[in-house]
């Protein structure tokens, strides 16, 4: 497998937090270059080193950087998008800049080139029994009785290629009823709420902390023939913005949340706030190692666990309110 190197520029104070969040996204390995660590080494070398290369000495003034490696395929593309969304969320919560500039840059390859290379991996895929997902440049001869959900790779997570998205859509297909009202928290590309509309929902609200994601979701909804009167997008963080949280107040039949473990745990009270009694909550984006922690936290809010889907280390679950 080919790999793409991604450098995340940050600060020493954020290393531990970033490591935890990257693990939740599915990144398993890191290379960390930190000026403070090297400065500590220089101060405590106790005269045991006769010579230190000048390149190493330069590390004492370097910008803290975490290097990760993503597969050069559609999963890697989605993971990079998820990494950037996570960094944007951290930056928004760090107005004093204690965590550094929190930017991710590709190494040794132009981002435009990689974006074009992704196209070879994005082919129409069937999800569940009722959906088929395709990018705009692919033609379909006969989708049969499946609804066609058109999503292009963009700067927002969710193309249907990643296990977390497919697991969520499979649970959604089994849960949705005609006329349902859907709330998509952490909507990314909008794939889950758009899929819900194509499966029979009457209206959907899609929310993301990333403004670009909210705009992308609205664009994708329009491409799929969904009226803006029935599909509303919102930008912001309901955990810290009560005005936004209040705008969403209502009784939803289904809530979808494909995020990461820590955010799902933090949002569990909002699931109770927004979901009608007897409604369905579908959560995903959970690495298998943290599955029980997340599902138990949601159960503590009075939800009843239903189906749990696991695929290649990722988990999604449905609950009843």
Image (cartoon, helix red, strand yellow):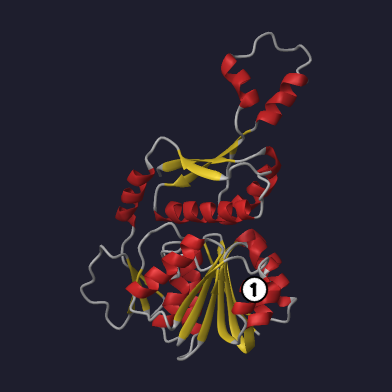
Q: Is residue 308 above or below residue 252?
A: above
Q: Is residue 54 above or below residue 75?
A: above
Asked where in the image residue 227 lies, by quadrant, the reply is bottom left
Can you identify the residue that label 1 sits on? 243
Q: Is residue 294 above or below residue 44?
A: below
Q: Helix, strand or loop at disc 1?
A: helix
| Crowd class of label 1 (few under 14; some 14 to 19; many from 20; radius 10 Å) | few
Asked where in the image residue 207 lies, by quadrant, the reply is bottom right
Give the number of marks: 1
Indicate the position of residue 234 as horizontal and vertical percent values: 53, 71
- Quadrant holding the C terminus: bottom right
Residue 157 can be seen, yes or no: no
Q: Residue at x 45, y 51 (%)?
A: 76
Q: Nearer the viewer, residue 269 or 318?
A: 269
Q: Is residue 230 left or right of residue 145?
A: right
Indicate the position of residue 56 as horizontal and vertical percent values: 60, 20
Q: Residue furthest left?
A: 141
């Amino acid at each position: 497998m080919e790999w793409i190197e991604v450098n995340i520029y940050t600060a020493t104070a954020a290393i531990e937090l970033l490591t935890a969040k990257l693990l939740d996204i599915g990144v398993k390995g890191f290379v960390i270059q930190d000026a403070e660590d090297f400065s500590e080494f220089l101060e405590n070398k106790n005269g045991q080193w006769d010579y230190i290369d000048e390149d190493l000495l330069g590390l004492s003034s370097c910008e803290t950087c975490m290097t990760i490696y993503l597969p050069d395929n559609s999963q890697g593309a989605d993971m990079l998008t998820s990494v950037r969304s996570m960094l944007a969320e951290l930056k928004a919560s760090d107005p004093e800049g204690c965590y550094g500039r929190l930017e991710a840059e590709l190494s040794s390859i132009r981002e435009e080139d990689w974006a074009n290379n992704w196209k070879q991996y994005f082919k129409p895929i069937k999800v569940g029994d009722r959906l088929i997902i395709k990018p705009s440049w692919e033609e379909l001869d006969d989708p049969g009785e499946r609804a066609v959900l058109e999503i292009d790779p963009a700067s927002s997570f969710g193309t249907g290629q990643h296990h977390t998205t497919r697991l969520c859509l499979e649970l959604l297909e089994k849960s949705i009823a005609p006329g349902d009202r859907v709330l998509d928290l952490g909507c990314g590309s909008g794939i889950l709420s758009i899929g819900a509309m194509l499966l029979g929902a009457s209206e959907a609200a899609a929310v993301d902390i990333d403004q670009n994601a909210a705009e992308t979701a609205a664009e994708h909804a329009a491409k799929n023939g969904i009226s803006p009167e029935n599909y509303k997008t919102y930008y912001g963080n309901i955990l810290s913005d009560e005005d936004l949280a209040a705008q969403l107040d209502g009784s939803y039949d289904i809530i979808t949340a494909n995020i990461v473990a820590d955010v799902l745990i933090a949002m569990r009270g909002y699931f109770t706030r927004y979901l009608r009694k007897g409604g369905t909550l579908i959560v995903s984006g959970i690495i298998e190692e943290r599955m029980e922690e997340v599902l138990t936290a949601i159960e503590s809010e009075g939800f009843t666990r239903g189906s749990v889907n696991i695929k290649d280390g990722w988990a999604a679950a449905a609950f009843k309110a």
